[in-house]
Image: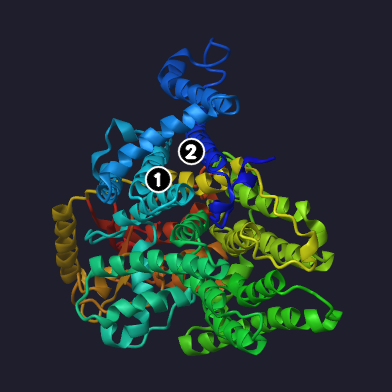
Amino acid sequence: MPLLNKINLHNNASSESPQLSQLTILRVYLLLALLVTLISVLPSLLATYGLGSVLGFSGSMLVRLSPGLLYALTLLVGLFLLEQRIGVQAIRFARKIIQLFKKLGFINWLLVTILIFLLIYHTLFEGSFLFQNQQMQFFILGHLSLLCALMLIGTGRVKPLSALIGGFSLCGLAIWVLYWIPDIQAYPFSIGWSETTWFYDASLFFSQRIYGFRVPWSSLHPSRYLMQSAAFLIPGLGLWGHRLWQVLLWIGLTLAGGIALSRRIKPANFWIGLGVVAWFSLFTFQGPVYFHLMVVIIIVLLGFNKDKLVWSFFIMVLASLWAGFSRVNWFPVAGMLAATMYILEKPLNEQSFWEYWLWPVLTAFSGLLIAFGSSLAYIFLSGRPAEDFVTSFKSPLLIYRLFPNEAYGMGIINLLLIASVPAFVIILWRVLTAKQAWRPLRLLALLTLHAALLIAGLVVSTKIGGGNNLHNLDAFLVFLAVTAVYVLFNQFSADDPTRLTRMNPPLTLILLAVLLPILFTVNALRPYPTPDLTKAWQVIEQMQVLIEQRTQEAGEVLFIEDRHLLTFGLIEGVKLVPEYEKVFLMEMAMSENEPYIERFQNDIQTQRFDLIVVSPLHLGLKDQTKPFAEENNAWVKYVAKPIDRYYEIVFTADDGQISLLAPKPIDKIK
């Protein structure tokens, strides 16, 4: 019997004998500690195989890893002994530890808070020897979660299994929130390739007020920039405030998605609900699922009601309207999610084929059509030509990025397997162990919906400009998460309840499903940056002086990047040139939009601009062994080389982040 069969997922532990329950909990704690240790140690161990003479392993690495290996062996022996006759003694020892924490009472809450704060502080600012690599961070985080669980038990208000869920949830959410903190800073230049473009695109909804004339709205992720534009309602809010607002959107809407899902499964207590919220947030972060897309999920999860299908259809319409100006591959998501929830929650019973299937089929197709109509309305209102919105359909597909390659390591498919297989196997386990409880057509419909999103996501992932993460598989990850939670918590309504068995998946599988998203988040952590703000502001002052000196009356300055300097008034006296913004220019280059590229190159050849603000131009081409080689080569061919031919550098910042270029004299043009 799998260990988890002794644990009631809805926390009704009263039906268990006290000794069995306590022994089971002790096993769970030891097994979690073992898994955390193995996940922390094994990658480093396997990486050294073939580099030494000790059974093929590096001797020095074995010495470094020996404490972790010995600790893992000790835990394994402990688990083995628990299966023998020492269970009662082990429970007595565990009780003594718990009693120590119970004596602290309310102080345990304070200790939990302090430990999480110390974890955040050390990761952000200290970089001590304990945090030299991600495996060590994960090891500490995992055992800190177990320690927090013991402290929650010590409060006297949380049961052991709920405390375990709470410990990992609190620490996991803390480390996830920690990931976003470095994005909140006052550095006046971009902290990523396209980071400040997000704020410029958001400003376009208020372009008349900010720039003095109407600028067409963005064609890329419009709903994202509409949400971010809300920060412009606060007069004088600077770049730091807009970065904070963006982080709040990421955190708030992702948590809201988890809360909406948790409400649907009706958790037995707060801690189980928190566990669902934490797991959903961390699981979808593996994409990541962007916050403006999470709105679609939240609307459907909160509003769907299987007993009020007219109302549910209206909810789907609202979500599809939002999806229509979010992202083209999210057009069908609202309708498909509503159909998925209908299939999960509504048994077939004695209904005829069309009585049951008409609503989900109609809803799925209607959602797609409504989103398409919403997209057309946005195109009309945006002020942009329709062809600006279809560039992604013209971009080349790079199939090799799905598979292991020199530039992207293990490739999209392997990354997806690591991220999703535990959740998928949980679903499969539940369904196969009671497959006669559901009509085959319902199972086939669910499989079809998930497969369609998987195939679409894999295709989009091969599009130039992607392939380095799973964000193009965001819809599939969301559907997988929703279905896994429904199935695990017995919310997948059976057609024949008498044949529904409650055989839970193996505990190890569920623990892996919990731990792997936490490991992914730990691997993404960054220390808080310490840029030289004084030098950055000196660069802006130098740029201001050069612009004033070199710009003729009615002359134009093209900010290919760092347009936020105009948005927030950090550079004054310059009229915005709406054309040729960096991200959109790259999109046109990757899709080889000839009319657009010809206009750009003609403006460069005629030296239309008195100055061009852009990052230093690199003219070298890359082969496929380098990340984003095709993107780099498109930029070099269509943008960098034409600029380099007709313009010359007049200023470059010391850190090499930004350059100003002026027209070359005729005799220097080759």
Q: Quadrant of residue 81?
A: top right
Residue that badge 2 annotates: 29
Left or right: 332 with respect to 667? right
Residue 557, percent from left and from top: 28, 72
- Which residue is depicted at the point 18% across and 62% down? 540
Residue 595, percent from left and from top: 54, 74
User: Element at badge 1?
Assistant: helix
Q: Which mark is residue 149?
A: 1
Left or right: 636 with respect to 237? right
Instruction: Check whether the beta carbons of the residues at disc 1 and disc 2 lie within 8 A of each other.
Output: yes
Q: Residues within 10 Å of mark 1 (few under 14, many from 20)?
A: many
Q: Quadrant of residue 250?
A: bottom left
Pick the quarter of the image with the N terminus.
Answer: top right
Look at the picture and state if 252 lies above or below 462.
below
Task: Give the residue type that dot 2 points to.
Answer: Tyr
Task: Give the residue type that dot 1 points to.
Answer: Ala
